[in-house]
Image: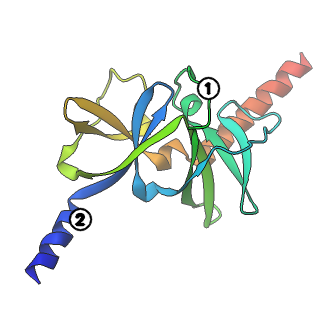
Amino acid sequence: MTELLDYQMTEQDDIGLLFVDISTEIFAIPIHSVKEVIELTKITSVPMCSDVIHGVINVRGSVIPVIDAATRLGLPQEQKYDKYSCIVLYEHEQETVQDLVVLGLIVNRVRSIEMMAINMQTNKPAFGSHVPEQFVSKMMRIQDRVYPVLDMPVLLDSQVINQEILNHQQSLLRYKEQ
């Protein structure tokens, strides 16, 4: 019985992380945020959408919007998406409609899934990062490197993304009227 209790305590002291490449950087995504990782498939572009929306994909009969991770994080996309690129499916409950929403996040590649000791986490920096601080929940220290842990509910907040799309569409319409 004590072995079982020790094991449960160890499990609670660990955090599962999916390490991914976005642009030229390495980020960690909490594994509890990941519904599924799929290989890069044909993405259909959506007219009048901002650059954040890479397009939509069909996953087993469901249309899933795909967010470009590099663009969302404000990073230059120095590497093209290729056969190693993946789409991380993220599922969350949208409060306004009280329904589950699935979004895809396209990343350059998935590196690994790791169980990390929770004491390896550090607070995010208040400044000095090239990624908007609201998208980072913590930093994960591994040996001599520190990796940002993405705050998925903030990064893929569908209400914020919908507002960005609306703003983009309105700016396009104003431009056409001129």
User: Residue 86 in the image: x percent, y percent?
Assistant: 57, 43
Q: Residue flagged by tag 2: what amino acid is it?
A: Glu
Left or right of 127, for residue 13: left
Q: Residue flagged by tag 1: what amino acid is it?
A: Lys
Figure check: 104 above or below 128: below
User: Residue 51 in the image: x percent, y percent?
Assistant: 68, 30
Q: Callout 1 environment at 10 Å: few (<14), some (14 to 19), or many (20+)?
A: few
Quadrant in which the N terminus is drawn: bottom left
Q: How many marks?
A: 2
- Which element is circle 2 on? helix
Residue shown at 16%/78% (left/top)? 4
Left or right of 178, for residue 150: left
Q: Callout 2 environment at 10 Å: few (<14), some (14 to 19), or many (20+)?
A: some
Residue 169 image-quadrant placement: top right
1 or 2: tag closer to the N-terminus: 2
Residue shown at 74%/43% (left/top)? 42
Figure check: 65 above or below 168: below
Residue under label 1, please give it: 80
Residue under label 2, please give it: 11
- Which element is circle 1 on? loop
Left or right of 44, for residue 135: left
User: Residue 74 in the image: x percent, y percent?
Assistant: 53, 25
Q: Residue furthest top?
A: 178
Residue shown at 29%/55% (left/top)? 15
User: Residue 94 in the image: x percent, y percent?
Assistant: 59, 59
The residue closer to the viewer here, 66 or 93, is 66
Q: Residue furthest left?
A: 2
The residue closer to the viewer here, 14 or 40, is 40
Residue shown at 20%/44% (left/top)? 120
Task: Name the disc covering residue 167, or none.
Answer: none
